[in-house]
């Protein structure tokens, strides 16, 4: 019995060491804090949880500043030219004629401001706002007006686009990971 308990103790100690190594060395590599100077600056400026911004960047581009989607969205936060130009026009000191969405700071600034705008538009509901980020705020407004998709006109009961539903779930899960790993 003593021998069994010693083996069990060694096994538990080994598992704890492996879990600790994973927590301190593996998870931060899987969920990086890339471009933190810009994420922290613009998340604070636009009153966003930095964990949400990191999660959007992770899900949109995996921190690749040169990423381009099939919809021609660009950069870290995958902003389209039209959205980028529109949002840039609302920002002081930003020239709408020369918005470089591949520039990390510009992309994060525009993406954060757009997220803030969506959260304001959709009464602070992250899931609804993320659906707007992925499928377009006009589509989400239509869904909210449809009683089958929204009982209260504020929250979505159903997201009709499978890609958007999956995107919202993924971003919310990744945000939880960032909060858990980094406490942000």
Image (cartoon, rainbow, N blue to C red):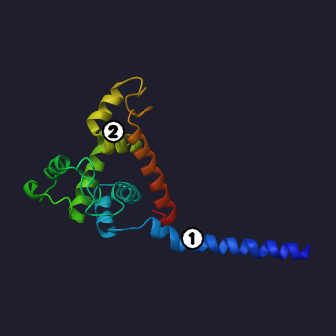
Task: Name the residue at 33% across, 58% down.
Answer: 61
- Rendered location of residue 133, percent (x, y): 31, 45
Q: Is residue 11 above or below residue 84?
A: below
**Residue at 76% across / 76% down in the picture?**
10
| Residue for badge 2 | 122
Q: How many marks?
A: 2
Q: Pinpoint residue 32: horizontal percent, then vertical percent.
A: 41, 67
Residue extending furthest front? Answer: 70
List x then y, in percent, for residue 39: 32, 63
Dot 2 lies on which element?
loop
Task: Measure how far apart labels 2 and 1 are at the Cα level.
Answer: 37 Å
Dot placed on the residue nearer the N-terminal end, 2 or 1: 1
Q: Viewer-proximal residue, 125 or 73? A: 73
**At which x and y percent is residue 145?**
33, 26
Quadrant of image for the C terminus: bottom left
Q: Quadrant of residue 40?
A: bottom left
Give the camera-side residue of 119 and 60. Answer: 60
- Rendered view: 23 above or below 106: below
Q: Name the residue furthest right.
A: 1
Identify the image quadrant of residue 152.
top left
Residue 113 is left or right of residue 176, and the answer is left
The residue pinned by badge 1 equals 22
Image side of residue 164 versus residue 84, left or right = right
Crowdedness near tag 1: few (<14), some (14–19) or many (≥20) residues, C-alpha within 10 Å? few
């Amino acid at each position: 019995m003593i021998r069994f308990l010693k083996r069990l103790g060694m096994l538990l100690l080994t598992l704890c060491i492996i879990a600790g190594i994973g927590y301190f060395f593996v998870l931060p590599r899987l969920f990086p804090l890339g471009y933190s100077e810009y994420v922290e600056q613009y998340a604070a400026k636009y009153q966003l949880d930095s964990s949400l911004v990191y999660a959007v960047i992770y899900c949109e581009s995996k921190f690749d500043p040169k990423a381009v989607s099939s919809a021609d969205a660009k950069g870290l936060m995958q902003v389209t030219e039209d959205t980028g130009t529109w949002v840039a026009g609302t920002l002081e000191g930003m020239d709408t004629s020369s918005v470089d969405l591949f520039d990390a700071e510009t992309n994060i600034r525009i993406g954060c401001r757009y997220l803030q705008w969506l959260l304001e538009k959709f009464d602070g509901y992250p899931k609804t706002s993320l659906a707007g980020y992925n499928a377009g705020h006009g589509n989400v407004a239509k869904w909210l007006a449809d009683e089958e998709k929204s009982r209260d006109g504020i929250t979505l009961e159903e997201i009709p686009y499978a890609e958007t539903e999956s995107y919202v779930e993924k971003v919310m899960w990744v945000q939880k990971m960032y909060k858990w790993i980094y406490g942000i």
